[in-house]
Amino acid sequence: MHPQIILITGASSGFGKFTAQMLSEQGHIVYGTSRKPSENIGNIKMLAVDVTNIQSIQYAIDKIIWEQGRIDVLINNAGIGIGGALELATEQEVSMQMNTNFGGVVNMCKAVLPFMRKARNGKIINISSIGGVMGIPYQGFYSASKFAVEGYSESLAVEVHPFGIKVCIVEPGDFNTGFTANRNISEVTMKDMDYGQSFAKSLKIIEKEEQNGCHPRKLGTTICKIVSRKNPAFRTKVGPWVQVLFAKSKCWLPDKVMLFALRIFYSIQ
């Protein structure tokens, strides 16, 4: 396999770390990003990048172009989660969620695309979520950010097609990563008389499903296949088979059935 120059955001832990390591083991030249300065992880060259900060992004891109002359693959993986009721979310929480999970994808794509257009070649892999296919209760703005990634990616795929650039979406279900422990929890929701008890019950279910989810290597294997293929599928769902099947069924299930199933699953009466 011809080595490719790959940039993956959020590579210090979870999906990003496993995927970066697997791509590096296949002989690719891999650059990873993390919000805080980090030592290189094996052969992975780590760069300090805040995906909401244009200046830090541009510094990283310029460094890679100076060292390698090109970027073949961009994997937008960085993201955060905030749990709480939509009604009670603060302006800061909404901004943080949307700016990181959606705005970060936009910022990274805008920085890399000029070089891919010039080369008339490139691949962008945006990590969405099964939560970007259906709205997850008490993770509403996480779902909203991933729905935004879905729409953005569909439009982008059409716009950059003439330049030989492929855009793909990966929609993971529940995986056992550090995402669970790092989720920000709305204390206001926890203490609310109307939402508090329901939120606590749903959160336990969410965390249990994540902790019993697939190993991150499963997602890494999926991304490695997308990187290696000349014409990969635009959309790929990966995770526990029940979740993948349920997400696929959304296109033909009546809305009221889908919403009823979500209420039952997340114990919202």
Image: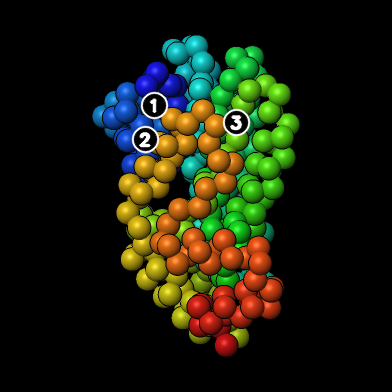
Q: Quadrant of residue 178?
A: bottom left
Picture disc at residue 30: 1
Give the residue pinned by disc 2.
20
Q: Nearer the viewer, residue 214 or 108?
A: 214
Q: Quadrant of residue 165?
A: top right
> Residue at image x 69%, y 73%?
255
Of the 4 image quadrants, the one containing the N terminus is: top left
Distance Cα–Cα, label 1 vs label 3: 19 Å
What is the three-letter code of the residue carrying label 2?
Ala
> Residue at image x 60%, y 35%?
167
> Residue at image x 56%, y 24%?
122
Element type where label 1 sits in the image: strand
Element type where label 3 sits in the image: strand
Find out whether the residues at labels 1 and 3 contact each other: C-beta distance under 8 Å: no
Of the 4 image quadrants, the one containing the C terminus is: bottom right
Find out whether the residues at labels 1 and 2 contact each other: C-beta distance under 8 Å: yes
Question: Compared to 203, does 243 lie above or below?
Answer: above
Find out whether the residues at labels 3 and 2 contact each other: C-beta distance under 8 Å: no
Crowd tier of the residue under label 3, counting other residues whose Cα lies within 10 Å: few below 14, some 14–19, many 20 or above: many
Looking at the image, is mark 1 or mark 3 earlier in the sequence?
1
On the image, the x and y values in percent for residue 98 come to 63, 51
On the image, the x and y values in percent for residue 149 come to 63, 47
Distance Cα–Cα, label 3 vs label 2: 20 Å
> Residue at image x 51%, y 28%?
230
Distance Cα–Cα, label 1 vs label 2: 7 Å
Crowd tier of the residue under label 1, counting other residues whose Cα lies within 10 Å: few below 14, some 14–19, many 20 or above: many
What is the three-letter code of the residue carrying label 1?
Val
Question: Compared to 252, does 229 lie above or below?
Answer: above
Give the residue pinned by disc 3.
166
Picture disc at residue 168: none
Looking at the image, is mark 1 or mark 2 earlier in the sequence?
2
